[in-house]
């Protein structure tokens, strides 16, 4: 795989490495398949976009992921680096949030804490100003 792209792949089988689980999870999000993404999440998952409130539990997380798969809404990721150490997987990536013709791109550092082969904590760090700048650039491109 090219370090600057992330191509969706088939979900990985049970017993795979934590890095492969995170890759498969991101693949499912890119494919717009929240049902496939769900299998990689611990029921008690905590999703924390740092500087925003934490989201607790698989049902709350799934409501957001399902919203990201509605018509006209999408998600892409350019995975720059991914590494696993113990029960943690670290990613550096560019996330692209899509709403109709608007594409907002911004840099993200993500930490995935694993429990029994599932994502128990998903923590993303990013600059709010980078998100805002990504929206402004996306608006200009959409016009």
Image (cartoon, grey):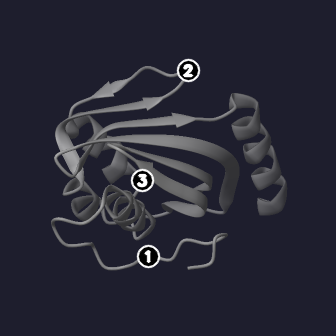
The alpha-carbon separation of the residues under discs 1 and 3 comes to: 16 Å
Q: Is residue 106 above or below residue 73?
A: above
Does residue 70 appear anywhere in the picture?
no
On the rendered structure, is 97 left or right of 66? right
Query: CA separation, marks 2 and 1?
Result: 29 Å
Badge 1 density bin: few <14, some 14–19, many ≥20, Cα 10 Å: some
Q: Residues within 10 Å of mark 3 (few under 14, many from 20)?
A: many
- Between disc 2 and disc 3, the foreground one is 2
> Measured from the top left, where is residue 124 in percent x and y?
51, 37
Q: On the image, numbered disc 1 is attached to which residue?
A: 8
**Residue pointed to by mark 3:** 68
Quarter assignment of residue 112: top left
Residue found 35% across the figure and 60% down from its top: 25
Query: Which mark, residue 113?
Result: none
Describe the element under mark 3 as helix, strand or loop. Answer: loop
Which circle's residue, 2 or 3, is located before the other in the chain?
Answer: 2
Q: Residues within 10 Å of mark 2 (few under 14, many from 20)?
A: few
Q: Is 121 positioned to the left or the right of 105 in the image?
A: left
Image x and y of residue 107, in percent: 68, 47
State the residue lying farthest toward the front.
Answer: 86
**Residue at horizontal 55 percent and vertical 63 percent from the top:** 76
The residue nearer to you, when weighing 50 against 73, is 50
The residue tagged 2 is: 51
In this rendering, would 125 be left or right of 10? right
Residues at discs 2 and 1 in contact (Cβ within 8 Å): no
Which of label 1 and label 3 is nearer to you? 1
Q: Residue at x 68, y 30 (%)?
A: 128
Image coords of residue 29 (percent x, y): 40, 61
């Amino acid at each position: 795989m090219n370090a600057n792209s992330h191509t969706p792949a088939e979900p990985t089988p049970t017993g795979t490495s934590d890095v492969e689980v995170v890759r498969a999870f991101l693949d499912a999000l890119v494919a717009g398949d929240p049902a496939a993404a769900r299998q990689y999440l611990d029921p008690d998952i905590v999703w924390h976009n740092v500087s925003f409130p934490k989201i607790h539990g698989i049902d709350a997380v799934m409501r957001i992921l399902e919203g990201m798969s509605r018509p006209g809404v999408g998600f892409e990721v350019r995975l720059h680096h991914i590494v696993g150490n113990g029960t943690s997987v670290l990613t550096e990536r560019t996330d692209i949030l899509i709403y109709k013709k608007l594409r907002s791109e911004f840099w993200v550092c993500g930490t995935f804490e694993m429990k029994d082969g599932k994502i128990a904590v998903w923590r993303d760090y990013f600059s709010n100003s980078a998100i805002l700048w990504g929206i402004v650039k996306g608006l200009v491109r959409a016009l």
